[in-house]
Each structure stands twice: as C-alpha cells, then as structure tokens.
Image (cartoon, rainbow, N blue to C red):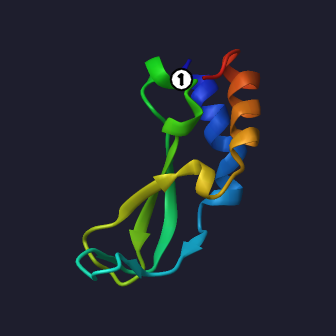
C-alpha cells in the first residue's frame, strides 16, 4: 500500500509542489494567512487512502511565519484526475 500511495504522490508532485497561493483573510479580518507555497502532498492514512477528498497539500508561508495551512489536493488537480490516479494505483476509489 505504501508504494501505491507514494506512486500517487509522485504522479502529482511535479505539478503541485512549488505552486503559490495569494494571501487571504476572512471577511472580518479575524483569520489571515500570508501568501504561501505548496511544499508537500499529504496522503490520508492507509485505511482511507482511496478517499479522494482526504488528500491534502501543506502550504508554507512565504513570509517566514511559523504557521502555514493545508488545502485539498483538488485545489491544484481536478478531482476527476485524482480519482483516476487512486483507482489506477489502489484499485478502488471513494
């Protein structure tokens, strides 16, 4: 299973890692995130690896802040494509 998960990560890494996102905040300004860069694709646990919506991407602050945030892999790759990759490497998709 680990090799299959690593294969999915490898399939999307070149396209995702290094992508940038602009800074944003909520409408009241209470939550703010500085501009960030995608640094790592984070798979779900092996038990849930076939659940496409659980695949995430770590975003690291470009401002050197200690905190970053996480977004769904589907922010960078169409969900249909993620599901195809999961089916190809794991045999089933949810």
Please, is residue 85 above or below residue 29 in the view?
A: above
| Residue 31 placement, left or right of 93 | left
User: What kind of element bears circle 1?
Assistant: helix
Task: Give the percent coordinates (x, y) of residue 36.
Answer: 46, 74
Please, is residue 15 above or below residue 63 in the view?
A: above
Task: Give the percent coordinates (x, y) of residue 18.
Answer: 59, 68
In front: 93, or 8?
A: 93
- Quarter where residue 53 is shown: top right
Quadrant for the C terminus, please. Answer: top right
| Residue indicated by mark 1 | 2
| Residue at position x 58%, y 24% in the image | 50
Report the residue that reaches farthest toward the front: 27
Other residues around mark 1 within 10 Å, as few (<14) / some (14–19) / many (≥20): few
Task: Give the percent coordinates (x, y) of residue 88.
Answer: 76, 24
| Residue at position x 64%, y 51% in the image | 13
| Residue at position x 60%, y 57% in the image | 75
In front: 14, or 55?
A: 55
| Residue at position x 27%, y 68% in the image | 67
Please, is residue 35 above or below residue 48 in the view?
A: below
Give the number of marks.
1
| Residue 3 placement, left or right of 63 | right
Quadrant for the N terminus, please. Answer: top right
Task: Give the percent coordinates (x, y) of residue 24.
Answer: 42, 79
């Amino acid at each position: 299973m680990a090799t299959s998960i690593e294969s999915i990560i490898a399939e999307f890494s070149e396209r995702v890692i290094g992508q940038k996102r602009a800074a944003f905040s909520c409408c009241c300004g209470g939550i703010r995130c500085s501009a960030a860069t995608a640094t790592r694709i984070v798979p779900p646990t092996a038990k849930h690896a076939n659940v496409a919506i659980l695949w995430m991407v770590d975003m690291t602050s470009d401002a050197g802040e200690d905190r970053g945030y996480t977004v769904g892999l589907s922010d960078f790759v169409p969900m249909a494509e993620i599901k195809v990759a999961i089916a190809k490497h794991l045999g089933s998709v949810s």
